[in-house]
């Protein structure tokens, strides 16, 4: 809320040391990196999150933290609904 995305990224990254494949941590990192303006890292983390949790596609479809990624075709590919 205070815009301290670097600190949020650092804290969440520390969580990855213990749970490297945790999809929710990757999703949060996607949000933080998007808000910090690093869309490449955001998309990488979003991809990892969608691999581990099918609900990520639904979350991302309405999460305003990810709004600046919406025009990127990679975002569309990562978040399109799949028959599961």
Image (cartoon, rainbow, N blue to C red):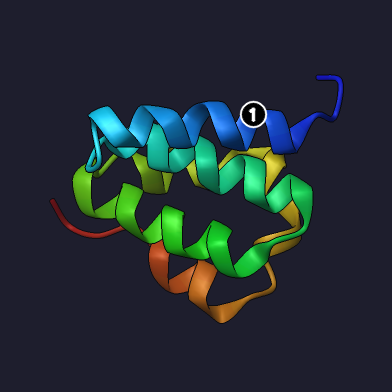
Give the image location of residue 29, x and y in percent. 52, 42
The answer to whether residue 73 shows anywhere in this view is: yes
Depth order, front residue of 82/47: 47
**Label 1 neighbour load within 10 Å: few <14, some 14-19, many 20+:** some
Quarter of the image containing the N terminus?
top right
Q: Which residue is mark 1?
A: 8
The picture quadrant where one finds residue 19 is: top left
Q: Residue at x 42, y 73 (%)?
A: 77
**Could you tell whether 79 is left or right of 30 in the image?**
left
Farthest residue, direction bottom? 73
Residue 30, given in percent of the width and then of the height, sits at: 54, 48
Residue 62 point in image, percent of width and height:
60, 40
Side of 75 relative to 69 (left or right): left
Q: Is residue 69 above or below residue 56?
A: below
Q: Can residue 79 be seen? A: no
Q: 25 or 7, which is in the foreground?
A: 7
The residue sitting at 80% across, 29% down in the picture is 4
């Amino acid at each position: 809320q205070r815009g301290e995305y670097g600190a949020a990224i650092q804290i969440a990254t520390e969580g990855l040391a213990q749970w490297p494949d945790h999809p929710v941590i990757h999703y949060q990192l996607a949000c933080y990196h998007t808000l910090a303006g690093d869309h490449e890292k955001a998309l990488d983390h979003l991809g990892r999150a969608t691999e581990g949790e099918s609900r990520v596609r639904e979350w991302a479809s309405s999460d305003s933290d990810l709004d600046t990624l919406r025009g990127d075709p990679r975002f569309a590919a990562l978040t399109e609904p799949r028959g599961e």
